[in-house]
Amino acid sequence: MADTSTYTPPKVWQWISENGGKFAKTNRPTAGATHEKELPHGKHPLQLYSLATPNGVKVTIMLEELLALGKSGAEYDAYLIKIGDGDQFGSGFVEINPNSKIPAMLDRSTSPPTRIFESGAILLYLAEKFDAFVPNDPSARAECMSWLFWQMGSAPYLGGGFGHFYHYAPEKLQYPIDRFTMEVKRQLDVLDKNLSSRRYLCGDDYNIADMATYAWYGNLVLNNAYEGAEFLDVASYKNVVRWATEIQSRPAVQRGRRVNKMSGPEELQVHERHDASDIS
Ligand SMILES: N[C@@H](CCC(=O)N[C@@H](CS)C(=O)NCC(=O)O)C(=O)O
């Protein structure tokens, strides 16, 4: 039986800043900087300001894959943005991402420097800049863009929907848990059916759509995100598990997952990255 507790919305919504939820200290209904704070810069062309969440690791995986291909222009400095402490609302960060979310990047090899926010936009910017991990043929590129944008549109149902209500919310409510579990299982089935006849999301070649989707759905089926593996029966999506296992075994993926990491085994955490030797 569905949860029947009800809430009658007031005429005009009011912000209750301390609602006890996990993100109560950082979530707010307004945009813009809350404090002055300049961002640091290192010596490399690319400056990344991020954290090793699924949206963050997409970009560090791509940078490590580019470096593994020998693209030395992809050398980068990665700085930690502690979103739990509100670093995303500092004035320097808001200048490069007015949306106050990680990841954000600054390319200082252009004049003036180019700012890029939104993980999908960063992946595409890097793929185009280095002519790698995105197909050039128009039809193949369209397929890659379709899966990349599928990921960008779908993952908020997984993280903001399922993850939030199943794992983080202060109360377990059946209606939103059912709603988002059904959607996430449908998404896993979309991936599983596509991967039943393809090695990677778009066919034989690994590209930015795989990196982006692995960071969310690969992590979900292999690493038990939101402690939801059993609840979602992730093992039954066998093609997704096979695809994610192959991607996770790539050395560049292993390295990318460690950059800006603040949780898990301490020996795997690389809070800032300025040189290949930082990820030993
Ligand atoms: N669509 C954005 C989403 C980025 C996003 O939601 N980032 C989260 C961490 S995964 C964040 O910075 N949250 C901090 C906040 O909401 O204040 C992207 O893909 O870059």
Image (cartoon, rainbow, N blue to C red):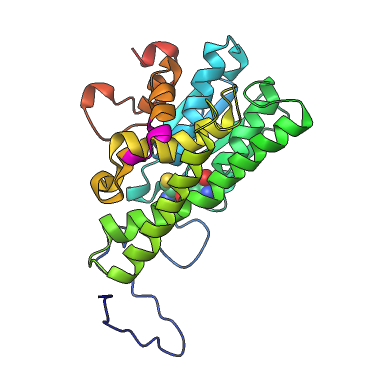
Q: Is residue 237 magenta?
A: yes
Which image quadrant for residue 236? top left
Frontmost residue, 245 versus 80: 245
| Residue 36 is at least partly visible in this image | no
Looking at the rendering, the stretch of residues picked out in magenta corresponds to 236-241
| Residue 59 is at least partly visible in this image | yes
Q: Residue furthest bottom?
A: 11
Frontmost residue, 90 versus 196: 196
77 left or right of 245 in image: right
Frontmost residue, 142 versus 117: 142
Q: Residue 102 at what x, y percent from top left?
A: 47, 43
Q: Residue at x 45, y 34 (%)?
A: 214
| Whether residue 7 is situated above or below residue 187 in the rendered picture | below
Frontmost residue, 243 versus 6: 243
Q: Residue 5 at what x, y percent from top left?
A: 26, 82
> What secondary structure prevails in the magenta region?
helix
Q: Residue 242 at what x, y percent from top left?
A: 40, 27
Q: Residue 44 at what x, y percent from top left?
A: 55, 20
| Whether residue 161 is situated above or below residue 132 in the rendered picture | below
Q: Residue at x 36, y 36 (%)?
A: 219
Q: Which quadrant: the C terminus?
A: top left
23 left or right of 198 in image: left
Q: Residue at x 60, y 27 (%)?
A: 203
Q: Residue furthest right?
A: 138
Q: Is residue 127 magenta?
A: no
Q: Residue at x 59, y 40 (%)?
A: 148
Q: Which quadrant: the N terminus?
A: bottom left
